[in-house]
Image: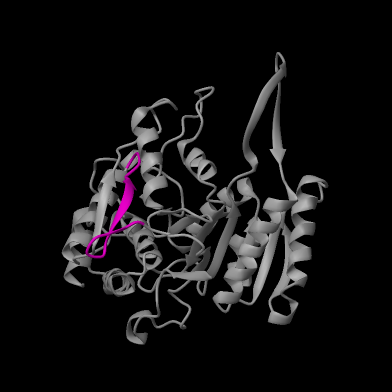
Amino acid sequence: MLRSITLFKPLAATLTKMGPRAMSTSTIVPQHQDAHNSKLGGRYTVTLIPGDGVGQETASAVKTIFKAANVPVDWEQFDVSGYTSADDNTFKKSVESLRRNKVGLKGILYTPVSSLGHSSFNVTIRKDLDMYASLVLCKNIPGYPTRHKDVDFAIIRENTEGEYSGLEHQSYPGVVESLKVITRSKSERIARFAFDFALRNGRKKVTCIHKANIMKLADGLFLNTCREVSKEYASSDIKFDDMIVDNASMQLVSRPQQFDVMVMPNLYGNIVSNVGAGLVGGAGIVPGCNIGREYAMFEPGCRHVGKDIQGRNTANPSAMILSSVMMLRHLGLDDHANKIAYAVSKTILSGAVKTPDMGGSSTTTDFTFAVISNL
């Protein structure tokens, strides 16, 4: 049995002024096991990792809103930092918590650039728990005007291989080899996820993003696998096409309305997600999640820690709040999800409270309490 997880159900037309798909999406999670840990009385225990940078501030906003809305969620919080070593005890406990609870909400953990041998905690969690599919939603939000209108596409990224396989070595002084691993089984898995997502959400087209003109074997395998999977969905009227990643980058910033569902290997997905976020308003508003057969972790779709504004109480908490809305739907708490989603939408649409990234001067705290007032 497959479960559909929705970010937003359609809000009132007077709020959204957009189509029924404007603020809704879903993804597919196999239900062959207990997808979440339920406590007595219908309360749920969720692992919370605020993350680095503005993580503590945006996580605090979520906790405050959940408390005001009487959401039946209890947090197991772990203040993990990407600056610590890979054998950090707190990090190990956080992964154990995720294994136990099956569901987590996470900010972004910093990954040092110059520390040799320091693996990314973000990547480690996704790979260790086989959360193979990253989903990021890029769509215009009413009340937040951007250069492009009618943007509405989903980015689906393979999370566990590609350039992020972590296989690097120095074969000779001054010569480094970094291995990119693409397998048919994982390419097929993410391709099916993309087409199932499109089918469940009334999407009309899936575009495979690749560089098969140069990496003919690796990206060629990914592209050909997507093509093979697409044939199985021909009767569903879902169109399939493909685009080379450099052309896709240009097309995104010139005519993003042509995209619907995009599926791609790991590195391209990371880059394209950031481009997509920039199209609709930035890192502060784009939600996301990582889904596997057994575990689900929800986090902002644009993975920036916001170190430059840390501690200033100016971060936009919308991405973290909306990611938590996705999490509530995963837990089956649709009423609470609707209430919070509506409050966020109304807050942004009113324009009375805007954080600096939205062109205002309101604080994170101001935005949080505005959402609460709209519950």
| Residue closest to the eye, 212 or 104 | 104
Residue 254 position within the rendered picture, expressed as x and y whole percent measured from the top left? 61, 64
Percent x, y of residue 173: 70, 13
Residue found at x 28% / y 46%: 76
User: Residue 187 appears at what percent x and percent y?
Assistant: 70, 54
Q: Is residue 59 visible?
A: yes
Magenta segment includes 305:
no
Q: Residue, x 77% and y 64% (percent of image)?
A: 227
- Looking at the rendering, in which quadrant would you find the C terminus? bottom left
Q: How far across and how far down the image is residue 258, in percent? A: 63, 71
Q: Residue furthest top?
A: 173
Count of labels in the image: 0
* Quarter location, residue 157: bottom right
Q: Is residue 44 magenta?
A: yes
| 260 sits left or right of 280 in the view | right
Q: Is residue 346 left or right of residue 159?
A: left
The residue stretch that appears in magenta: 37-53
Residue at (46%, 83%) from the top-left corner?
Answer: 20
Determine if residue 211 is in view. no
- Colour logic: one colour
Pick out the residue farthest to the bottom: 13
